[in-house]
Amino acid sequence: MEECERSKLFEQTVLPHLDAAYNLACWLAGNDHDAEDIAQDACARAFRFIGGFRGGDGRSWLLAIVRNTAWSWLKKNRPAAIVTINEDELAEIEDHGAAASLVHGADKGALRAALESLPLEFREALVLRELEGLSYKEIAEVAEIPVGTVMSRIARARGQLQTAFNEKGAA
Amino acid sequence: MNCADLRPLLHAHVDGELNAASSIELQRHLKSCAACAAEEKSLCSLKTAFRQAPLRHEAPASLRIHVRQLAGDAKAPARPRQSDFSLLWKWLAAGATAFALLTLMLRPAGMSDHDRFLDEAVAGHVRSLMVEHLMDVVSTDQHTVKPWFDGKLDFAPDVKDFAAEGFPLVGGRLDYLNGRAVAALIYKRNKHFINVFVWPATGDTKPETTALRGYSIINTSTHGLHYCFVSDLNAKELGDLAALCQK
């Protein structure tokens, strides 16, 4: 592929989704500075691999690169941030009916804090769903997991947020 | 099905991801089970909290400049960490030309008229966000936006604010689409912008949803006007706005 064609494809595919890329990087890295580094690296990779982009959804394609870049970066620089969750055990923990939550009255800072405290896998699924509006199928593509796993991660992430709010309300 | 079986499906239900058969079964259960109905309500209020909280981070100018540089000059070696203002001005100056070119490039040859039109609509949406020419008239008041179009177009677009429904009107703009001048109404959903292109049409058509380059597009005609909704918002929520506009 010629250089100018690559640039053209890159501009069409990547540039419109920079906010989405940066937002995901922020929520995975946990701070602006590292997020910008990660997003820059991811875009540089996207430019290198743009020849392999076979059309379709540019946003999911870019977000998958951002996600991989962020996870590699975290493994190298913040290994403590990556705690592998055992999804089967978690199912037991939070399935005790988080009924009427108090989310309604909770302040916005509390939601941010609760989202930040979620395990990485849950946080990314919920960020892609609620902040980027991706479908389960698109999230499955980005995170390279089955759609069923997307559904259970989102359910468990929400369960944890509800529990956090309930405890806050009860305190 | 009992509550334990249905609980996980509630999430897919509030996300609009449940298939029709399960959805009907779930609705039936929700009518008779207070606990599950309360859980549904709780999930909906959590989703509302997400929509209202300013949680989405926007890319800083320094990142935007760097990434543009990648495209503009593949050999650019440096990765400026700090935003360079002289560079910024250079880019702003080059901006107008670049966007004009981009628009041309976004319209590849060998497409059907309909594909080309969809492509143009997405390009119009992208361009409006990129050149910071999103709005000619900035107002959340429908009584300001509607008269603004008077004399600028040969028709009167229907302008309504849907802030109460979660789609505040933020402004309007003149645009050019499908070979004619059109009204562009801009709505917001959380941090997502929605361009609604409006022009006269004959006859009604049912909403048709398309996806292109990560954008959702809905086309529909009603009451003598054609509406084209474009956004990076998911198709379901964009459909909610389309339904509101056609009421």
Image: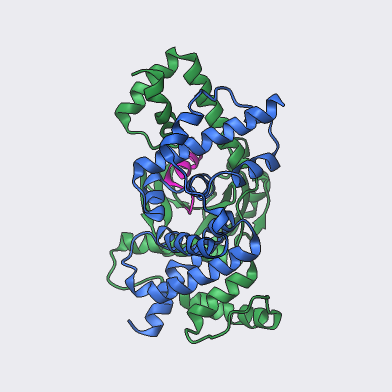
Residue at x-position 66% and y-position 78%: B88
| Residue B237 drawn in magenta | yes
Relative height, residue B55 to residue A111 (above, below): below
Q: Nearer the viewer, residue B106 or A81?
A: A81
Count of numbered labels shown in the rendering: 0
Residue B44, percent from left and from top? 54, 31
Q: Which image quarter holds the N terminus of chain B?
A: top left
Q: Is residue B21 left or right of residue A93?
A: left
Image colouring: by chain
Q: Name the residue nearer the viewer: A97 or A15.
A: A97
**B123 or B59: nearer the viewer:** B59
Prevailing secondary structure of the magenta residues: helix
Q: Is B66 one of the magenta-colored residues? A: no
Give the magenta range: B231-247
Horizontal relation, residue A20 to residue A57: left or right: right
**Tint of chain B:** green
List the single residue furthest toward the top: B32
Q: Nearer the viewer, residue A77 or A164?
A: A77
Which chain is displayed in blue in the rendered image? A
Q: Residue at x 57, y 77 (%)?
A: B96
**Is there any visible trace of residue B133 in the rendered image?**
no
Q: Would you say residue B45 is visible in this rendering?
A: yes
Instruction: Pinpoint residue A15: horizontal percent, then vertical percent.
Output: 50, 68
Residue B151 position (above or below residue B76): above
Query: Which quadrant of the structure image shows residue B138?
Result: bottom right
